[in-house]
Image (spheres, grey):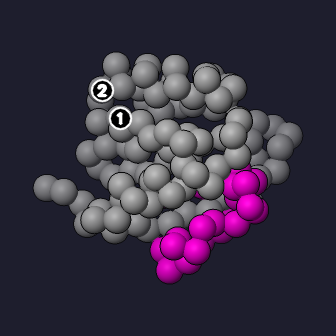
Amino acid sequence: MISPTLRAVVIGGSLKEGSLPAAFASMEDRRYPSRLGEQTEIEIIELTVPTQQVAAMALELSAALKPRFFYAHLLDKQRMLVVFPRTVVEIPRGDAGAVSHASSVGSLFRIPVEQMRFAEM
């Protein structure tokens, strides 16, 4: 069964313009502070994206990310879409090859390996 929505998670500081694209305004659920590692304070933005809009929203989000060090993700029970700058990688649940591929792509954007815990998500 296909889920009617995917949950999106974005780090506020990862956005080039400092805010989400306008198309996401009605999808935002909450924002809260968190830590990246032990030292870096970040803001997490969670959104609910309707399945029929996921492809377009993932591409729009990929255009809004800073060019290095960040990614966002959208997920449901069947898959995760990892959104890198100008790139989107799909990871079907349990697909180790897709996890490895996403990690390889993330390294191109200088994302530390310890921050790409896709298999755990």
Above or below — where is 72 with respect to 114?
below
* Front residue (pair 91, 117): 91
User: Hey, what amino acid is under mark 1?
Assistant: Ile
User: Hey, what amino acid is under mark 2?
Assistant: Asp
Q: Which residue is mark 2?
A: 95
Mark 1 falls on what kind of element? strand
Above or below — where is 12 with respect to 98?
below
Give the residue drawn at x 58%, y 52%. Answer: 63
* Residues tagged 2 and 1 counted as in contact (Cβ below 8 A): yes
Mark 2 falls on what kind of element? loop
Q: Specify the quadrant of the image occupied by residue 112.
A: top right
Above or below — where is 99 with respect to 19?
above
Relative to 72, 69 lies left or right: right
Number of the label disc, if any, that sits on residue 80: none
Residue 119 % position (x, y): 43, 30
- In the picture as drawn, the residue positioned furthest to the right comes out as 39
Quadrant for the C terminus, please: top left
Mark 2–mark 1 Cα distance, whole angstroms, equals: 7 Å
Let me know if residue 97 is in the magenta part.
no
Give the residue drawn at x 13%, y 55%. Answer: 1
Examine the rendering and report whether any part of residue 11 can be seen: no
Let me know if residue 21 is in the magenta part.
yes
Q: Residues within 10 Å of mark 1 (few under 14, many from 20)?
A: many
- In the picture as drawn, the residue positioned furthest to the left comes out as 1
Q: Specify the quadrant of the image occupied by residue 2.
A: bottom left
Q: Which residue is mark 1?
A: 91
Q: Which residues are magenta?
A: 8-32
Residue 5 % position (x, y): 32, 65
* Front residue (pair 105, 2): 105
Relative to 109, 37 lies left or right: right
